[in-house]
Image: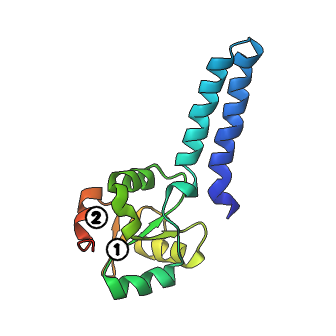
Amino acid sequence: MMRAWTLPILLVLCGSVVAAGPILAGLAWESTAILVVFVLLAGMHSPLAFPRSIGALEAQRRSAVDGRPVVFWRSGCAYCLRLRYRLGRHARRLHWVDIWRDPAGAAVVRAANDGNETVPTVVVAGRPHVNPDPRWVRDLLPPST
């Protein structure tokens, strides 16, 4: 679980170090702006930016019932961020599995990608798709009720 928070913590720490220079020079506004940028970057790369993750087995079970795709992701992945933000409000309608929190999810991704943990891997009707176009994923969703 800590691995998912490593990059956000490093971003906040680096931002604090970078912001220390302007604060020591008496430039409080510049220092604040730098720190805000780093905190925003940390938030974007944290698990908080994604819908709540569930286990791979539960996601596959739910997907079999409702037909919605399962997205295997990990924090810090730029392609996962791209998918998440391009899906917008539709992202919450998918089943998300954080492979750093769920060993079964990591195993599914490795099985689909020749032993590599390449994410995002979207599984639709049992077929994996690596880094698919967000519009394609959005089109797969059933109409909202």
- Numbered tag placed on residue 45 in the rendering: none
The residue carrying mark 2 is 137
- How many numbered badges does the structure rendering display? 2
Q: Is residue 110 left or right of residue 90?
A: right
Q: Secondary structure at mark 1?
A: loop
Q: Residues within 10 Å of mark 2 (few under 14, many from 20)?
A: many
Residue 53 falls left or right of residue 136: right
The quadrant of the image that shows the C terminus is bottom left
| Residue pictured at 48% horizontal, 65% vertical | 116
Query: Which residue is farthest top?
Result: 25
**In the image, farthest residue toward the front:** 145
As drawn, 122 above or below 132: below
**Spatial separation of the CA atoms under disc 1 and disc 2:** 8 Å
User: For residue 100, which quarter of the picture?
Assistant: bottom right
Q: Secondary structure at mark 2?
A: helix
Identify the disc placed on residue 69: 1
Would residue 133 be visible to someone looking at this image?
A: no
Residue 5 point in image, percent of width and height: 65, 54
* 139, above or below 112, in the image: above
Q: Residue placed at 38% from the left, 62% from the top? A: 91
Specify the quadrant of the image occupied by residue 15.
top right
Q: Position of residue 14 (x, y in %)?
A: 68, 34
Residue depicted at x 35% and y 88%: 65
Q: Amino acid at mark 2?
A: Val
Residue 56 visible to an observer of this rendering: yes
Residue 59: % across, % down: 45, 80
Amino acid identity at mark 1: Pro
Residue 86 vs 98, above or below: the answer is above
Please, which colouring scheme is shown? rainbow
Q: State if disc 2 and disc 1 touch (CB < 8 Å).
A: yes
Along the polypeptide, which appears first: circle 1 or circle 2?
A: 1
Residue 45 percent location from the top left of the image? 54, 49
